[in-house]
Every structure is written in structure tokens, then in C-alpha cells.
Image (cartoon, grey):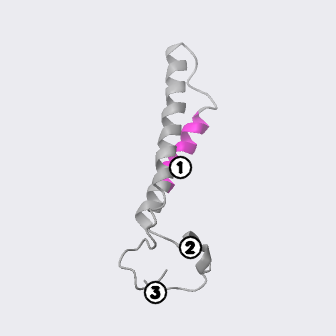
Amino acid sequence: MSDNKSSRWPRNMQPAGMKLALSGAIVVIVFGAYILIQAMNGASMASPVWLGVILGLVMVAYGIYRRLRGPGALDFPEEGGTNVQRRKE
């Protein structure tokens, strides 16, 4: 990342993580709705579909983390792509 940029997100790049968080929210809603509909029809709440809800929650959490943390070295592979060189921000 170049030091002459005033923003932490150079080259008009959108912050990472928002698409991941939104898709995770959609996954949670879809799988959660399926579980609730099945429960209203008398099925057991013990279902492997809960794994989809858990996966969606992990996606949301990681998306929010990426949004709050800011850009990492892996976001710019043309500049090395690792955190081996401790860059000063």
C-alpha cells in the first residue's frame, strides 16, 4: 500500500467484507426460514440444516471483521501479498 494515499483503501477499492457479510446474512435467513417452516409443520428442530445457519453466521462475522480491520497485504497481491514485511501504516 502506498503511503501517499490519504485513505486506507487505495485505488478506489471498496472495503472488503461487505459482500461476504451480506451473503452470509442471506444464507442465515434462507436456512433459518427453512428450519422454522419445518418446525411449524411438526418436524424436529434437530436438523443438519443448522450447519447452514452456523456457516452463514461465520460468514457475517468474518465479513464484519474484514470491514472493520481494513485492507491487508493479501488484498494487494501485486505488492507482495504477504505480511512478511512489516509495513508501517
Whether residue 52 is in magenta: the answer is yes
Residue furthest to the right: 48
Name which residue type carries label 2. Answer: Phe
Residue name at image x 40 percent, y 63 percent: 68
Q: Observer-nearest residue: 41 or 73? A: 73
* Label of residue 76 in the image: 2
Q: Which residue is mark 1?
A: 58
Which amino acid lies under the numbered mark 3 shown in the image of this protein? Lys
Q: Which one is earlier in the sequence, the residue at label 3 or at label 2?
A: 2
Give yes or no for residue 83 being in the magenta stretch. Answer: no
For the residues marked 3 and 1, what is the alpha-carbon distance in whole angstroms? 30 Å
Residue 89, relative to residue 22: is it above or below?
A: below
Classify mark 3: helix, strand or loop: loop
Q: Tell me the magenta residue range.
A: 50-62
Q: Counting residues from the N terminus, which is met first, the one under dot 1 or under dot 2? A: 1
Task: Determine the CA span between mark 1 and mark 2.
Answer: 24 Å
Secondary structure under tag 2 reads loop
> In front of the other: label 1 or label 2?
2
| Real-space CA distance between mark 3 and mark 2, rounded to the nearest whole angstrom | 16 Å
Q: Residue 1: horizontal and vertical position, in percent?
A: 49, 80
**For mark 1, does the 10 Å Cα neighbourhood hold few (<14), some (14 to 19), or many (20 or more) residues?**
some
Q: Judge depth for marks 3 and 1 and give the one in front.
A: 3
Whole-percent x and y of residue 52? 59, 38
Q: Which residue is tagged 3?
A: 88
